[in-house]
Image: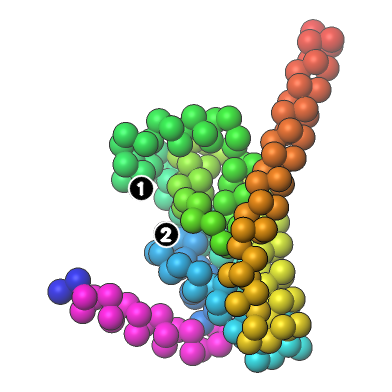
Amino acid sequence: MITLTLRLLAKAISIIMAWGQPGLFVVAFLDSAGIPLPQGVDALVLLLSAKNPGLAYVYALIAMVGSVAGCLVLFYLARRGGKPFLDRIVPPEKTRRFREWYHDYGLVATFITTVVPVIPLPTKVFIASSGALGTRAVPFVLVVTAARGVRYLGEAYLGAQMGEHAWEWLRAHGRELGLAALGLFVLLYVLVKLGDRYVNSRSSVQG
């Protein structure tokens, strides 16, 4: 029964992908809304960009809009469901760890997990944490839009420039991209902490 369901799901995904631009939007939306389609959006952006280089950045924008819309669905579901909703996504024994992670790193962690396509980071956990733990919607949308924009515009560029070899290049340089993401995470975290310290110091002086 499970095997049959997986086959039907794979067939449905292949049909959706064959739709081109509308299919790209649907796949990006479903993937970000919590239905796992591992690297399906990335592969589709690369494939479409390689076949039609002139429309590469259009594909990137479609994927970005679909992904942000899907993230918002998961965000508001988590906001409405609160901690019980988060507990359904994350094993109860790990919920506290992720809550502490999000408390320490906040939208910085959301940005990194949303922008990196090659590391199996729990993106949906941080999206759900953003909603369940009370993050404001506008900063959340800005962060996710920036992250998905960087990710899909970069993949569109690779697809347009390298054609069918783009996916191989992305997989071959996964380690370097992971290290770059780690460096970006550290930089953003330091900047956020310095900003918080500056705001707190100003508040103390004014108080």
Instruction: Tell me the tag on residue 89.
Output: 1
Q: How many discs appear? A: 2
7 part of magenta stretch:
yes
Q: Where is residue 198 in the image (x, y as percent from the top left)?
A: 81, 22
Crowd band around label 2 with a 10 angstrom C-alpha radius: few (<14), some (14–19), many (20+): some
**Quadrant, the N terminus:** bottom left
Q: In this view, does 83 lie above or below 176?
A: above
Residue 50 occupies which quadrant of the picture? Answer: bottom right
Look at mark 2 in the image and give the residue it sits on.
34
Report the residue at 45% width, 61% height from top.
33
168 or 204: nearer the viewer = 168
Left-right relation of 80 to 58: left
Q: Is 111 covered by the magenta stretch?
A: no
| Residue at 59% from the left image edge and 55% from the top image edge | 114
- Discs 2, 1 touching: Cβ within 8 Å: yes
Instruction: Report the magenta residues as a range.
Output: 3-22
Percent of width and height locating residue 16: 45, 84
Q: Is the magenta stretch mostly helix, strand or loop?
A: helix
Compared with 4, 83 (above or below) is above
Three-letter amino acid code of the residue under disc 1: Ile
- Check disc 1 and report its element: helix, strand or loop: helix
Measured as percent of width and height from the top left, residue 27 is found at: 49, 74
